[in-house]
DNA sequence: GCATAATGATACGGGTCCGTAACGATCGGG
DNA sequence: CCCGATCGTTACGGACCCGTATCATTATGC
């Protein structure tokens, strides 16, 4: 069941959602942080620093810093893997789930408002 | 002609496109820069610093700095308004148009690949 | 001509992020 | 044991961006 969308519609959708994010002032997330956050909330656990780095094609410090920032914002949390104490398991939070849900509603609503152009 | 998309589809689309942008390494654009770039390429000219700042709900230095960065990348260019030399007119470039078109194709393609979930 | 307004750019102090390299902690094999 | 491999984190120098305040340039009204 593919989703049919024309390039011009895609651009207008992309612009409008980004405008909303900027205007809401809550869009302090970079493209990398967005990719990390959505991976955590859409893919099956467990999530590790190394695994996320591999999926995004970036180095581990990038993931560590992004988790620091998003942790301050309360969007994700970390805990040690008790079975292999070298690993860190990245966990979801209530605030993170709310933010993801809000983004989903925003994209969905803006898509619904798209005209035929 | 609204575009029907479920919240779960919207999230998977958002994640996949951001993953592509990060992996391509071309995602040096922040949410603000993306909003500015798409506004320039989708809305009718002329575009000024003040006008963009008003549309995005940010201050003028934010626009100036974003234009500096995107100008270095060749995505936009600036010239003086000869009829009111206080104004600066922001213009599109070939490279910018290509980048926008590429983004449109990316979103469109990833939308087409979406399953029913 | 002169004062005022408007535009975009710049200075400043502070924060975040980058990539590379090194680090401490932990696991595992010999 | 102990040495190497693996994990996530931190250090470093550099770059970018933020918001506020200020600046030079240009236009406008009297």
Image (cartoon, coloured by chain):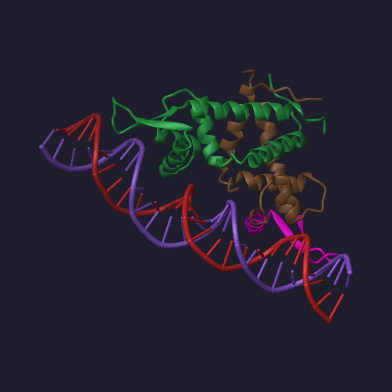
Chain colours: A green, B brown, C red, D purple
Horizontal side of A113 relative to D1 (left or right) equals: right
State whether residue B87 appears in this view: no
Which quadrant holds the N terminus of chain A?
top right
Residue toward you, D30 or C28: D30
The part of the image, by quadrant, that contains residue D8 is top left
| In magenta stretch: residue B58 | no
Q: Residue B3, located in which quarter of the rendered image?
A: top right
Image quadrant holding the C terminus of chain A, namely top right
x 64%, y 46%: residue: B32
In this view of the protein, which residue sits in the foreground, B85 or D27? Answer: D27
Q: Out of A8 and A72, give the one closest to the viewer.
A: A72
Residue A32: percent from the left, percent from the top?
A: 53, 40
Image position, residue A58 (x, y; %): 47, 42
Residue A38 can be seen in this image: yes
**Residue shown at 82%/51% (left/top)?**
B45
The percent position of residue B61, horizontal first and vertical second, equals 64, 57
Q: Position of residue B42 (x, y in %)?
A: 77, 44
Tell me: residue B68, above or below residue A48: below
Identify the magenta region. B63-91
Q: Quadrant of residue B111?
A: top right
Residue B87: say if magenta: yes
**Left or right of A54: which side holds D3?**
left
Q: How many labels were placed on the picture? A: 0
């Amino acid at each position: 069941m593919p989703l049919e969308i024309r390039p011009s519609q895609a651009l207008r959708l992309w612009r409008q959602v980004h405008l909303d994010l900027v205007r809401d002032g809550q869009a302090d997330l970079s493209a990398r942080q967005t990719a990390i956050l959505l991976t955590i909330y859409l893919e099956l656990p467990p999530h590790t620093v190394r695994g996320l780095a591999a999926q995004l094609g970036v180095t581990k410090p990038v993931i560590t810093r992004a988790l620091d920032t998003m942790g301050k914002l309360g969007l994700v949390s970390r805990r040690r893997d008790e079975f292999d104490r070298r690993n860190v398991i990245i966990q979801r939070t209530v605030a993170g789930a709310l933010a993801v849900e809000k983004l989903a509603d925003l994209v969905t609503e803006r898509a619904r408002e798209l005209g035929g152009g």
